[in-house]
Amino acid sequence: MTGNNVNKSIIEKLFENSLWNSRLVVLSAVVASLLTAFAMFYIATVDVWFMLSHLGDYVSSDLSGEARIKFRSGVVTHVVEIIDGYLLATVMLIFSLGLYELFISKIDAAEESENSSTVLLITSLDDLKNRLAKVILMILIVKFFEHALVMKFHTPLDMLEFAGGIALVGLALYLSHAGDHSSSHDKTH
């Protein structure tokens, strides 16, 4: 080997090592996503605490029938918002773990644990995308339910649009479920 080839080989090796190690920049997204997940879990949990602390007001004899109905509706809406917060926290957690497993390293503790959930084991970018899409679909369904709770029906068309929305939600769930069966069927054959 000539000196020129040795220098080229060393430069190539250094460049390839630098290129490979550049994947570590993903750690910033992993940490930021994990912190965001923790923040959303915290916010949703604080919301639960405040909702529970105000439940005693529901039994107050000072509440009229209409005020009790409004209070109950507010609590149900608040519960839906809490579910939404926890789902969003879950999206960020799955995203964080998925990015780490795809770009940095497999999580040994998850693979070694007998009780680990396969939901958190990400094997490809498509796998991460599919898992996130399902949770995001659930968030959209919860948001639809949240809006349905306060929706006012003034015309028959309003009711028809609401029924169409329910049908579309059902279709989205059916298609996501059918996609699960076709991908698992493809893996076995």
Image (cartoon, helix red, strand yellow):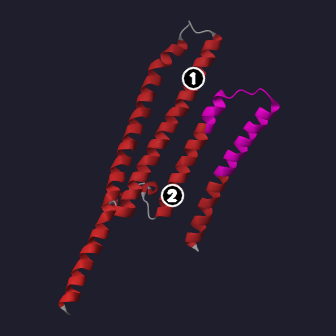
Residue 89 at x, y = what percent? 44, 42
- Seen in the image, is 13 located left or right of residue 76? left
Quarter of the picture containing the N terminus is bottom left
Q: Secondary structure at mark 2?
A: helix
Residue 20 in view (yes/no): yes
- Magenta-drawn stretch, dominant element (helix, strand or loop): helix
Magenta span = 144-173
- Which is nearer the eye, 129 or 115? 129
Name of the residue lying farthest toward the bottom = 1
Q: Tell me residue 106's x, y (percent).
A: 34, 63
Say what amino acid the circle numbered 2 marks: Lys
Identify the residue under disc 2. Answer: 129
Q: Tell me: 98 left or right of 31.
A: right
Horizontal and vertical percent position of residue 179? 62, 60
Q: Which residue is at the far front?
A: 4
Quadrant in which the C terminus is drawn: bottom right
> Is 157 in the magenta?
yes
Q: Is residue 122 above or below residue 162?
A: below
Q: Which of the two residues, 75 or 25, is positioned nearer the viewer here?
A: 25
